[in-house]
Amino acid sequence: MVEYYQPTSLQEALKIRSENKVTPYAGGTDLMIEADENLCYLFLNKVCEMRGIYEDAEYIRIGAACTYEKILQSELVPQILKDAVSQIAAPAIRNLGTMGGNIGNGSAKADSALVCFALDAKLQLSSVSGSRLVDIDKFYLGRKKLDMAENELITEILIPKADFGRYSYFKVGARNALAISRVSFAGVLSLKDGRISNIACAFGAVADTVLRFKDLEKMFLGKTLAEASAIKQDFVSAYSQSIVPIRGRVSMEYRKAVCMNLLNEFLSQSDI
Amino acid sequence: MNSIDFVLNGKEVKFTGNPAARLLDVLRDDFRLTGVKCGCKEGECGACSVIIDGLLVNSCMVAMGSINGSTITTIEGYCETARYAVLDKAFASVSAVQCGYCIPGMVLAAECVLAKTPHPTEDEIRVGISGNLCRCTGYNAIVNAISIAAKEGNGLW
Amino acid sequence: MTMNIGGSVEKKDHAQKMSGKALYVGDYPLEGVLYGKLLHSSKARARIAEIRLPEIPEGYFVVDKNDVPGDNNVNIVKDDTPVFARETVEYIGDPILMVVGPDEAETERLLKAIEVVYEELPAVLNVRDFDTVFFEYDFGKGDIEKAFAEADKVYTEQFETGYQEQAYLETQGMIGEPQPDKMTVHGSMQCPYYVKGAVVRAMGSSPEGVQIKQDTTGGGFGGKEAFPSILACQVAVAAKKAGKPVRVIFDRREDMEFTSKRHPSLCTYKVAVKDGKITAMDIDVIFNGGAYTTLSAVVLQRGIICSSGVYKVDNLRVKGRAVKTNLVPSGAYRGFGAPQTFFAVEMIMDHIAFDLGLDPMQFKLDNAVKQGDATSTSGIYHFPVPLPEMVEKIDAASGYREKRLEYAIAQTGRYRRGVGSSMFFHGAGFTGSGERDHIKAVSKLHKYPDGSVEILVSNSDIGQGLKTTFSKIVAHELNLPYEKIIIENPDTDRVPDSGPTVASRSLMTVGELLRRAAIKLRESWVDGEDQIVEERFKEPDFLIPFYIDKFQGDAYPTYAWGVNVIEVEVDTLTGVSKILGAWGCFDVGTPVDLNVVLGQMEGGYLQGIGYASIEQMAADEKGRIRNNSFSDYIIPTSMDVPKLEVIMHVEKYPDGPYGAKGAGELPLVGAPGAYIGAMEQALRKPINKAPFSMDDTMKVLQGVKL
């Protein structure tokens, strides 16, 4: 029998990860498309520490091996993330698939990663030598390139506990189930004392990584809705220049048009 | 670890082959449970659906090593149950089975819909079977059959 | 129980399929069976200069054209499809050789280690660039020049349709089993005797030397009409060489990329209108046949015969060509050429109605044929044409007329709605004299001493319910319980040739033979005796003889009719369209089993909706089909349509069993016209192609010319 590892504790998992050449396996729904029988898997689906959802003072902490179905059932998870997760694939895949796997796979089409970008989520990466927190946008270094060492595992996804205010999640797939995103959008906007205290606009499945332009968002920060409305055209045209889609199952032009439409719609819904 | 132990259709079994093998292939080739159909091997059609620990999954998307300690039900095990008998009658009453290739997976998807929601709405049924492609029926008859089963099997789920 | 024709019973194959016990070809035990894997051409057109093989271990075999004991041409309509590629390959996917062996992984390793040296040749990859015409037909009637000269207005437009993949859930698969005295091949198929003819020829054997058995088949839709003949020849040749059973089961990507699909089409219509009536049509139809002819001749024949739609066109000229491209051979798919031309004719009728300021449904009805009118081929619509009644029924169910007016008013806001309609027929059974001249169907009933009766026919139940409907007919005539009727999957050693399972012919034609056989058996019934009765096809005597060289006469004895209405809502931000409602009124004569007929109508209708909307497939600049998986070739899920509303209308056909007509193909035919009609209304722009994607919709919304 070929070796395989099915640890039940995180400590055990990290030890195996550091000592062996293994492929971390959370839900398997990406890995098993290729199903390379020569891989030695580190199965994470029984690691208790990676399967729960809980909160501390600052964050909602989602175990990286927590299935989409569990995320949907949790009362702690913000609705915008549930909106995204509920549209992933179909029930049988949601019963297996995990956010850790979705993010760790490094695809710009990962629907849960998009929401993480919009919510300024952080990833907890752990190894035998300790843990570190990485901002989600720093984690993606390029197409399928991740800031993750050979001996590390994504163990948790940390969503800041904040009032995300108005939010919008929109996925364009080829059909209503079992659909890979062709364009996806996640936006959040919150006000404090009548001024925009937080805004995030993230675009998925458009380029090699999720697109979010924090510099452009700053145009609106600290402004009232009326002030933001006054510079809306500048804001939108700045996005129009910044979003450079790649061609895929749909054309670049299509992706661009939909990104701009969804951005405009989000702003309108936010009274901008 | 030197064997993968799990419960398959009510019996304790052992697997000592490659832990990276697909559950689908092992069920079909090693355990000869050919009611588990292969339609794509990419998690896109649902023909290979089985129930693991009470949840519907595509068996093509599962590596053997991940199921150590799990309980698995395939159509071969499920068709011995009282719930199956209700679904069987319901599917027959509206002739929901055409080519039949999606059906074992579809039946298990129906079981999971009803286990979660004993009296589902049409939309809930459609969501529940949305990962199970059927090219023959247009889904009307299958959705009807599951509704009928929910009524006739009152109390079973 | 007495069989209630028209009602519904538990399907004969229900229990086996429901419980997962039915054996499909991939479900047979693997002991002693070798795996076969095909090496497909990776070039669209090339001469094979050299094939470099790795060392082939003991027990493994490489099988190619030199191993074909008989003729390396697959017996389809013509002789050009090879069992294994000849000196050249003609499309990406052309089967060059097969590696056969006892271990699947090793077989695949060997396959990957084979190096083919190609000398590439110029390839035709765009249908518009064709240089070889496989088939060309012309026909017409009346005085077309005069009609165009006298017309109030002339409309000219071109329409394009894409591939459609059958996407049966069970892929192609076949097992060849050498026996001491013959070759047995069994697998997934629609037409056991087609397969037999092909294997006999490839093996150079006598008819007795080949046995073909259909296994439970996981859907066909035309995709298992001709292709299984090719695969069966390949496994038979391999099994003969290896001296052991060989099985080939395609994986999904192989199946989607390399097996036949619906012909893409390019149709140009010129239509004359005078006093609000269509007076002439000049139609040019081009079907993309792909690399080999396979079934293109017959697909094209049906396509062009249907090209003037349900309309009375006294002056008609039709030219049809099936052309060669270096792409996967196109083939049969439910509707068989008719969905393409019906789409074109329905769209141009919509566009003319729009231009004339008329409601398209009324305009179509005003121009539709009536009983006694001439067909496109100067035959006659011998039976009532129930379109007016069907329009009333569908309008009552769908609210079409009201919605059409409501959505015609300029819409604002994110979501825009539209409703479209189509009218269509399906010519029931084989085109022309095929049934009389070529098929000559024979059916048998075998009564056993215990009083049970076995149906012996070569038609296969591929999900459409033939085992059930055939059994009902026989039980009804013999006053026997349904359970006393036996029907197994066809085995050419046991069943006569009652023809292929195609053209919506099985129930209407073979079902009627069985009805007559049952009457014969009833009249000669002797308790306790073993009895066999046989019945042969007889052409109905009302037919005007059809001549295929002139396209003259009754191409079909009767027609099944349909009217569709589809309502959509387009999201202008994303170009995504949602189907709000889909209604279909269908006349397939008497339903022998209502559930079975409803299942056919609903399933076929959804395939048609998919064809018009989300089912995109195209070859790239190298000639490779990239939409080769269920994640790239998108078929509808349960969440993509609401409940399909099917309304039956019954116009009985006296020569079909109890009045039944062909049913299976009809529901697919009209969906593209109705769907695109609805999209046009929502977008307020004419559309000339199907499928119409969200990308296309966005272009229209942005004012980009398509």
Image: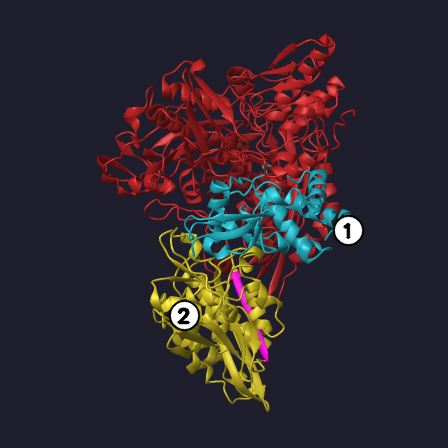
Chain colours: A yellow, B cyan, C red
Q: Is residue C410 left or right of residue A173?
A: right
Residue at screen point 70% across, 36% down: C595
The 10 Å Cα crowd at callout 1, few under 14, some 14 to 19, many 20 or more, is few
Q: Nearer the viewer, mark 1 or mark 2?
A: 2
Q: Which quadrant is home to the C terminus of chain A? A: bottom right
The image shows residue C516, relative to residue C144, as above or below, that is above
The amino acid type, in three-letter code, at marker 2 is Leu
Q: Is residue A146 magenta?
A: no
Q: Which residue is rendered at x = 44% and y = 20% of the image? A: C197
Q: Are marks 1 and 2 on the same chain?
A: no
Question: Under tag 2, what secondary structure?
Answer: helix
User: Looking at the picture, does residue C336 appear above or below residue A167?
Assistant: above
Chain under label 1? B
x then y, percent, for residue A31: 42, 57
Q: Position of residue C354 (x, y in %)?
A: 60, 49
Mark 1 to mark 2: distance in Å?
48 Å
Residue toward you, C371 or A213: A213
Q: Nearer the viewer, residue A195 or B54?
A: B54
Residue ID for mark 1: B154
Taking the view exactly as shown, the residue that stands out farthest to the right is C1
State the extent of the magenta-drawn residues as a range. Answer: A165-172
Compared with B139, A50 (above or below) is: below
Residue C356 seen by the camera: no
> Looking at the picture, how far across and down is residue A242, in whole percent?
40, 74
Asked whether, in this view, residue C576 is left or right of residue A244, the answer is right
Residue B54 visible from this viewpoint? yes
Q: Is residue A166 magenta?
A: yes
Question: For the residue marked with disc 1, what is the amino acid?
Answer: Asn
State the residue position of label 2: A14
- In-front residue for pair A163/A238: A163
Q: Which mark is residue C512?
A: none
Which secondary structure, mark 1?
A: loop
